[in-house]
Amino acid sequence: MDLKGDQMKNNSENGFKKFTMIGVCFAAFLIAFAVVPVQAQQTTVSLNTPKLVQGNTVHAAVEIANVNNLDAGQFDLSFNPDVLKVVNVEDGSIEGTKIPVQWSSIDADTIRVLFNLEGVTGINGSGQLAKIEFEVTGDGDSNLLISSGLLGNTEANQIDTNWGVTAATDVQESTPGFEAVSALVGLIAILGLARFSRKL
């Protein structure tokens, strides 16, 4: 009777251990699948630069991936004025939807690009925010760099974004704060007033 009791106890303990192990594995499985989609959907903005040949006109594409509910944004693009001259900034496109941009020079080596989308539906997907047309005027390092990047959704909230020089290297994560949110609200207000005045 004692042997049978010990055997039943061992079987019960083994069954409990197996049940616990299965539960732990199932929990780990759920956590893994809960984390992976978040990482895969991280919004990224990168700069795709062509080969630079003096005397040529080239386009640098500002590309965006995995954005959700995009409504407005801005970024600065710095460059070496001894090598490059900005000729124009062309509208971008995300999943077939045009991104109308406005731009201006804020320094000899920096331009600022702004955009605000018509309607309140927001845009999802991947594509290009803009194309920067450069004239290659000299030899040397182009020093292209995106900075002061800010994206907002239709609820005037900042979109968490990784900004980088290229899609694969030198990616820096944005650090949202009060100043960034204030800038976003101001950006949407300014572009909204400009759009309203054009309609008048």
Image: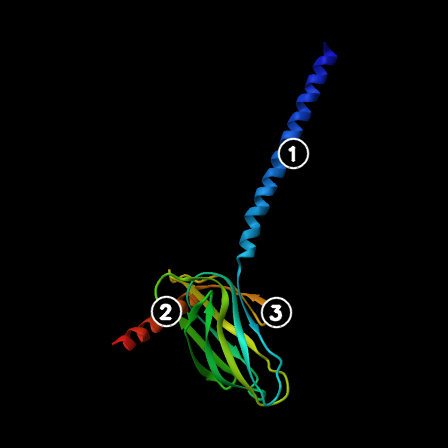
Q: Amino acid at mark 1?
A: Met
Report the quarter where the C terminus lies.
Answer: bottom left
Q: CA distance from mark 1 to mark 3?
A: 41 Å
Task: Using the image as rendered, state which of residue 63 and residue 177 is in the foreground.
Answer: 63
Task: Compare marks 2 and 1 and give the one earlier in the sequence.
Answer: 1
How many numbered marks have been drawn onto this rendered protein structure? 3
User: Mark 3 or 2 closer to N-term?
Assistant: 3
Q: Residue furthest right?
A: 3
Q: Is residue 182 above or below residue 83?
A: above
Residue type indicated by callout 2: Ile
Q: Measuring from the top left, give residue 107's x and y in whole percent.
A: 48, 84
Q: Residue at image x 64%, y 86%?
A: 140
Disc 2 to disc 1: CB gap under 8 Å: no
Q: CA distance from mark 3 to mark 2?
A: 29 Å
Badge 3 local density, few (<14 within 10 Å), some, or many (20+)? few
Which residue carries the number 3 mark? Answer: 170
Q: Secondary structure at mark 3?
A: loop
| Residue reaching furthest to the front | 96
Residue contact between numbered discs 1 and 3, judged by CB atoms under 8 Å: no
Q: Is residue 134 left or right of residue 200?
A: right
The kind of secondary structure element at disc 1 is: helix
Q: Which residue is mark 2?
A: 188
